[in-house]
Image (spheres, rainbow, N blue to C red):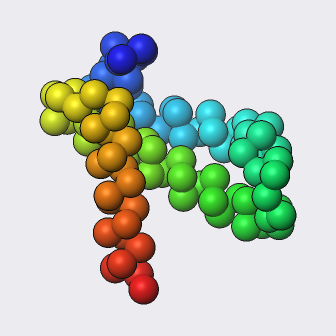
């Protein structure tokens, strides 16, 4: 995977939050791209981007901690299954 060394360095130095800070700084640029074809209110978009960012960063942290064993397809399937489980627990 590209940029794995950077991700591992951020994780090992406990600076993974830098990615989250970057997302927060540039979320106004991200939202129009993500939601260009969806009728979503600005406040709701903030929540969606914030939640998605946390999920993705958490996924990457666990993936690194587990030794980067999964390829992109397996990681995507793990993400999808985890979101389904999360959805079941809150409903």
Classify 15 as above or below 20.
Answer: above
Q: Nearest the camera: 29 or 12?
A: 29
For image coordinates 53% across by 47% down, the residue present is 53
Image coordinates for residue 67, horizontal then vertical, percent: 16, 28
The residue positioned 45% from the left and 44% from the top of the image is 56
Residue 60, x across and y down, in percent: 35, 37
State whether residue 77 is above or below residue 85: above
The total of numbered circles placed on residues is: 0
Residue 74, x across and y down, in percent: 28, 38
Judge from the rendering whether residue 28 lies leftward or rightward of residue 17; answer left or right.
right
In this rendered view, identify the residue nearer to me: 80 or 64. Answer: 80
Foreground: 3 or 35? 35
- Residue 14 visible to an observer of this rendering: no
Q: In terms of depth relative to the viewer, which is nearer, 73 or 88?
A: 73
Q: Is residue 86 left or right of residue 47?
A: left
Residue 25 found in image quarter: top right
Q: Quadrant of residue 61?
A: top left
Quadrant of the drawing holding the N terminus: top left
In the drawing, does residue 39 fall left or right of residue 12? Answer: right
Confirm whether residue 81 shows in the render: yes
């Amino acid at each position: 995977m590209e940029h794995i060394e950077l991700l591992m360095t951020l994780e090992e130095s406990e600076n993974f939050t830098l990615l989250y800070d970057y997302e927060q700084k540039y979320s106004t640029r991200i939202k129009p791209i993500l939601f260009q074809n969806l009728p979503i209110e600005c406040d709701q978009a903030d929540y969606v981007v914030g939640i998605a960012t946390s999920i993705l960063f958490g996924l990457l942290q666990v993936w690194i901690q587990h030794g980067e064993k999964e390829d992109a397809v397996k990681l995507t399937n793990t993400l999808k299954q985890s979101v389904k489980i999360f959805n079941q627990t809150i409903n």
